Structures are given as C-alpha cells and as structure tokens.
Amino acid sequence: MAETSFMDDVVFPVHISFGSTGGPDWPVDIVTLGSGREERNMSWSAPLRSYDAKYGVRTHDELYEILSLYHVAMGRLRGFRLLDWSDYRSCAPLRAPQALDQSLGTGDGVTTTFLISKRYTIGPHSFDRRIAKPFGEILIAIDGQPQGSGFSVSPSAGLVSFATAPPPGAAI
C-alpha cells in the first residue's frame, strides 16, 4: 500500500507555477425550492484549490520535471506545495509585505506559539484563512517592529514559535 502522507519538503517547480492558472473554489450545493427560493449548503470550511500548469511548461525538460513529480506523488495520492502567484503574500501580490499586514494574535506574556493566518476583508465582512504550510520568507513583527531572530516558523504546521513570549498587549 502506498504512503499517503503530505510531502512537506516538495514544492511544485516555482518557475513552472508562474504560468499556471487556477485558485480557490468553494463547493456549494444550491437547491431551488418549489417557491423559487434557494437553499445553499457549503460542504467545506475552507476552499479547495486547483491549478492547471500546462501554460507554465515551456520546454521538454520542464515537462519531464512535472512528470517526475507526478510519479513521486503517485498522481493525486500525495500532496505537495504550490506557489499561488495571485495570493502568496500577506498583502496584494504586487505590494511589498509590511509588518502590520496581518494579525496573528496579541501577546499575553505567556503564549509563545501562534497560528499563521491571513485575513481577507470586504467592507464589514471577513474570512480568516489558516496558512498550514507556509513557503518562503515570512515577516514576523511585534508591535509593528520586524523581528530578525527570537522565533522559528514550522513549515509543516503553520506555526510561529517565539523563544520568549511576546509582552501582554503586543500585536503579533
């Protein structure tokens, strides 16, 4: 029987993902009642993501690279990371990340571990997306001051752990 684990250390080739299309999809069942009213049922608490990389493949070597990944992942059996060029920063894709783009929580002087998440907001409505498997560089700040050390990021759990708990009331 094949191992079905997520391949934490495998990233879809970034140079090929740049030309990919796709993104999030919220599977929703819509039932139209006899009155014309609709009932909606969402099956997932987070969107499913799918991508098409065919436009990113430009050479036979790149095609072979994808074929190798496909075999190692055993098709759709084992997951891997993919850089979504439309949503890979704490801010809009063409902006530079800033220390206050996202909130991970508030220090209490005791807690040292925080979940990495990203908030999407339109007017008074928002959605918080857990970043379970971060990839690349992460800007961590306490009260708006970027931290160069004193913390670690778990790329397989989406957690930031501080060596010393941030002070009470500090914005993380």
Image: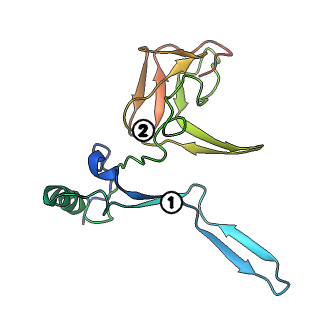
Asked if residue 111 lies left or right of residue 85, the reply is right
Instruction: In the rendered structure, find residue 94 and report the number of the disc placed on it.
Output: none
Residue at (75% x, 81% y) in the render: 32
Give me the C-alpha separation between circle 1 and circle 2: 17 Å
Choose the circle earlier in sequence order: 1 or 2: 1
- Viewer-side residue, 116 vs 35: 35
Q: Residue furthest bottom?
A: 34
Residue at (61% x, 56% y) in the render: 45
Residue 139 image offset from top left, x and y in percent: 47, 25
Amino acid, disc 1:
Leu
Q: Are the two marked residues, 1 and 2, in contact with CB atoms closer than 8 angstroms? A: no
Q: Is residue 165 visible?
A: no
Asked if residue 3 lies left or right of residue 172, the reply is left
Looking at the rendered image, the quarter that the C terminus falls into is: top right
Crowding near the residue tagged with mark 1, few <14, some 14–19, many ≥20 C-alpha atoms within 10 Å? few
Asked if residue 72 lies left or right of residue 94, the reply is left
Residue at (41% x, 14% y) in the render: 149
Considering the numbered disc 1 on the image, is that residue within a helix, a strand or a loop?
Answer: strand
Residue 83 image offset from top left, x and y in percent: 38, 46
Quarter of the image where one finds residue 108: top right
Check the image and report above or below for 102 versus 54: above
Q: How is the image coloured?
A: rainbow
The residue that disc 2 covers is 134
The residue that disc 1 covers is 48
Residue 71 image offset from top left, x and y in percent: 20, 63
Residue 86 image offset from top left, x and y in percent: 47, 47
Residue at (33% x, 54% y) in the render: 5
